[in-house]
Image: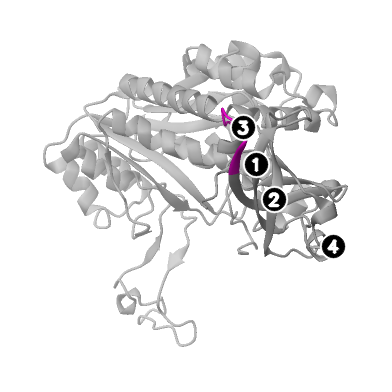
C-alpha cells in the first residue's frame, strides 16, 4: 500500500478509509498518542495506538526522531486542533532513534545557536521545517515570475577570472600545490602553471556574464550560488549565498525600478498564498521572541502585516541627495543617536539610515537612486552631472537594503575611463568591453540576495537560519 502524505491526510474530505502514513515521531504520550510528521506540512497527524495489543518492545521503540510506518483507518478526530487522526491497526519501526542521544528534543526548546551546530537535524523542528518550505516556494516563485515574463534563465560560471564587484574578497580556485608552489622570476605565484592557466576565483556575481547574454537574448536572469571571502560574523553575512540577477536590454533605470518592485511583490504574494500555515507559525514565533526584547527594540508590525505592507504600498522613489537632506535634518542625527552621523553629501548609508527612511520617515518601501559615483561600482552609468551614477537600492522595513542595481554604463569610452581611474585591467575584461564595441545599447539590472529575501519573508533575524547549511568564517561543517 502506498503511503499518503500527512498534509493530504489532514486535508482529506472523507474519513473511514484505510491509509498508510510514514514519517518521524515528534512526540509519543501516554503510550497511545503519536504525533507524526513527514515534512509535508507544519502540522502533525495524531496516530492512536492500541497499546493493550501492541508489544511492549515495539512501544519502547516509538521515540522522538524514530521513523515509523502506520497503517490504519482515517477517522474524525475527537481532540481539538485537527480534523482527522489515524486509528492504528499496524505499526512498523523503520528506523530507531535513541531517545537519550537524539540532539533535538522538543521539550528542551533548543536555542538557535544550538540548532545551527546541528544543522543536519534542525529541519526536524517546526521552525526550520517552516523556513525551508517557505524558502522552497520562494525559489519556485522566482523562476515562475521570470519565466512568465519571457526571461531566459542563464547559468553563469561559478569559477571566474573576474571580480565583478571590485572588492577583492574572493575565494581563490587553484590546483597548484601548497608545497613547492611554482613562482615567477620576481617571486609571485606562477598562475600560468595552474589548471586554468590564470588566476581564478569563486564568483561574487553573475552580473557581468549575464549582461553579455542580455545583449543577445534581450532579457535574462541568473539564480545561483555566489561566494564572498569577507571575514564577517554578523547576522547579515554569509560566505556562500544565492543571488537573483536579471539583466534587461533597452531598460533604463526607471524600467529597472518598475521590474524590481513588480518582481518582489509577485514572489511575496505567491509565497503568502502557498504557505499560509507556515507563515502564521513563523509570525507567532516572532511575537514570542520579541516579548523578551525591550519595547523599543520590538518590531512595530507583525510578520504578515509587514509582508502586506510591501504588497499594498507603492515603493517611494527618492534620490540619494534628497535622502541625505532628510537624514541630516532628522532628530536621531541631530541628537547623535545614529551610530554613523550624517554630516555631508557623499556618505555611504548604513542600515540604521536606510531603516529610518523606510520605517520612520516615509513609512513604506523606498527606492533610493542616483548615488555618488565614488561609492558605487565601475559599471554603473555616469549621469550628466559627472558625480552621480544611475544606481538604485531598494530598502525594506526591518532589514534595510534588499536589492542593489543600476542602469549599466553602455558607452565604451566612458566605461574605459572609469576602469582606468579605478585600476581595473582592460585586458582581463576584454570580453565585457566587446559588448560596448559591438551593438551597445542601454541596459539595466539588479541583484537580490536570496537569503535576505527569505530572511524578510520568514521574519528571522539571522541569515544563518534561512539557508540549509550556512558557510561563515571558521564554519564549513556538514
Q: Which mark is residue 15?
A: 3
Disc 3/disc 1 C-alpha distance (Å): 8 Å
**Is residue 38 left or right of 116 when viewed as pictured?**
left
Q: Quick one: label 2 or label 4, which is nearer the N terminus?
A: 4
Tell me whether the residue at label 2 lies in contact with that at label 1, contact meaning CB atoms closer than 8 angstroms.
yes
Please state the extent of the stretch shown in magenta in the rendering.
Answer: 11-18
Is residue 12 part of the magenta span, yes or no? yes
The residue carrying mark 4 is 56
At 63% from the left and 59% from the top, the residue drawn is 473
Please state, as top left, top right, bottom left or bottom right, where the C terminus lies in the image.
bottom right
- Give residue 414's quadrant in the image: top left
- Give residue 98's quadrant in the image: bottom right
Mark 2, Cα crowd under 10 Å, few <14 / some 14-19 / many 20+, is some
Disc 2/disc 1 C-alpha distance (Å): 8 Å
The residue carrying mark 1 is 73
Disc 4/disc 3 C-alpha distance (Å): 29 Å
How far from the left and from the top, in percent, is residue 464? 63, 48
- Image height check: is 39 above or below 193? above
The residue carrying mark 2 is 89
How far from the left and from the top, in percent, is residue 276? 59, 26
Amino acid at each position: 500500500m502506498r503511503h499518503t502524505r500527512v498534509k493530504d491526510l489532514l486535508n482529506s474530505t472523507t474519513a473511514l478509509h484505510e491509509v498508510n502514513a510514514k514519517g518521524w515521531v515528534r512526540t509519543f504520550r501516554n503510550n497511545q498518542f503519536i504525533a507524526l510528521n513527514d515534512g509535508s506540512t507544519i502540522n502533525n497527524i495524531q496516530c492512536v495506538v492500541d497499546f493493550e495489543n501492541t508489544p511492549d518492545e515495539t512501544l519502547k521503540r516509538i521515540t522522538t526522531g524514530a521513523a515509523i510506518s502506520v497503517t490504519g483507518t482515517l477517522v474524525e478526530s475527537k481532540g481539538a486542533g485537527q480534523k482527522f487522526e489515524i486509528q492504528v491497526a499496524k505499526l512498523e519501526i523503520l528506523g530507531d532513534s535513541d531517545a537519550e542521544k537524539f540532539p533535538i528534543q522538543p521539550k528542551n526548546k533548543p536555542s538557535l545557536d544550538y540548532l545551527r551546530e546541528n544543522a543536519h537535524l534542525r529541519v526536524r523542528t517546526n521552525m526550520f521545517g517552516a523556513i525551508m518550505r517557505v524558502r522552497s516556494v520562494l525559489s519556485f516563485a522566482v523562476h515562475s515570475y521570470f519565466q512568465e515574463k519571457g526571461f531566459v534563465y542563464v547559468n553563469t560560471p561559478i569559477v571566474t577570472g573576474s571580480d565583478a564587484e571590485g572588492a577583492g574578497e574572493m575565494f581563490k580556485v587553484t590546483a597548484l600545490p601548497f608545497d613547492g608552489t611554482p613562482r615567477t622570476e620576481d617571486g609571485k605565484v606562477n598562475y600560468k602553471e595552474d589548471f586554468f592557466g590564470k588566476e581564478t576565483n569563486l564568483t561574487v556575481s553573475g552580473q557581468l556574464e549575464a549582461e553579455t547574454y542580455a545583449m543577445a537574448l534581450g532579457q535574462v536572469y541568473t539564480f545561483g550560488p555566489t561566494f564572498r571571502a569577507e571575514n564577517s560574523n554578523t547576522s547579515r553575512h554569509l560566505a556562500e549565498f544565492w543571488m537573483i540577477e536579471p539583466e534587461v536590454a533597452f531598460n533604463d533605470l526607471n524600467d529597472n525600478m518598475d521590474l524590481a518592485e513588480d518582481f518582489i511583490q509577485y514572489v511575496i504574494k505567491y509565497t503568502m498564498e502557498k504557505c499560509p500555515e507556515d507563515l502564521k507559525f513563523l509570525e507567532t514565533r516572532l511575537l514570542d521572541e520579541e516579548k523578551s526584547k525591550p519595547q523599543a527594540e520590538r518590531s512595530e508590525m507583525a510578520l504578515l502585516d509587514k509582508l502586506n505592507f510591501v504588497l499594498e504600498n507603492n515603493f517611494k522613489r527618492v534620490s540619494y541627495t534628497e535622502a541625505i537632506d532628510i537624514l541630516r535634518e532628522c532628530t536621531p542625527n541631530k541628537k547623535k543617536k545614529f551610530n554613523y552621523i550624517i554630516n555631508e553629501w557623499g556618505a555611504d548609508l548604513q542600515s540604521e539610515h536606510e531603516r529610518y527612511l523606510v520605517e520612520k520617515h516615509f513609512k513604506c518601501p523606498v527606492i533610493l537612486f542616483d548615488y555618488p559615483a565614488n561609492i558605487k561600482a565601475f559599471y554603473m552609468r555616469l549621469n550628466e552631472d559627472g558625480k552621480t551614477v544611475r544606481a538604485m537600492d531598494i530598502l525594506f522595513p526591518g532589514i534595510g537594503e534588499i536589492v542593489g542595481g543600476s542602469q549599466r554604463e553602455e558607452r565604451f569610452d566612458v566605461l574605459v575611463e572609469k576602469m582606468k581611474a579605478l585600476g581595473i585591467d582592460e585586458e582581463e575584461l576584454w570580453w565585457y568591453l566587446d559588448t560596448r564595441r559591438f551593438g551597445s545599447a542601454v541596459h539595466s539590472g539588479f541583484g537580490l540576495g536570496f537569503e535576505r529575501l527569505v530572511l524578510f519573508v520568514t521574519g528571522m533575524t539571522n541569515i544563518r537560519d534561512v539557508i540549509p547549511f550556512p558557510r561563515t568564517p571558521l564554519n564549513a561543517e556538514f
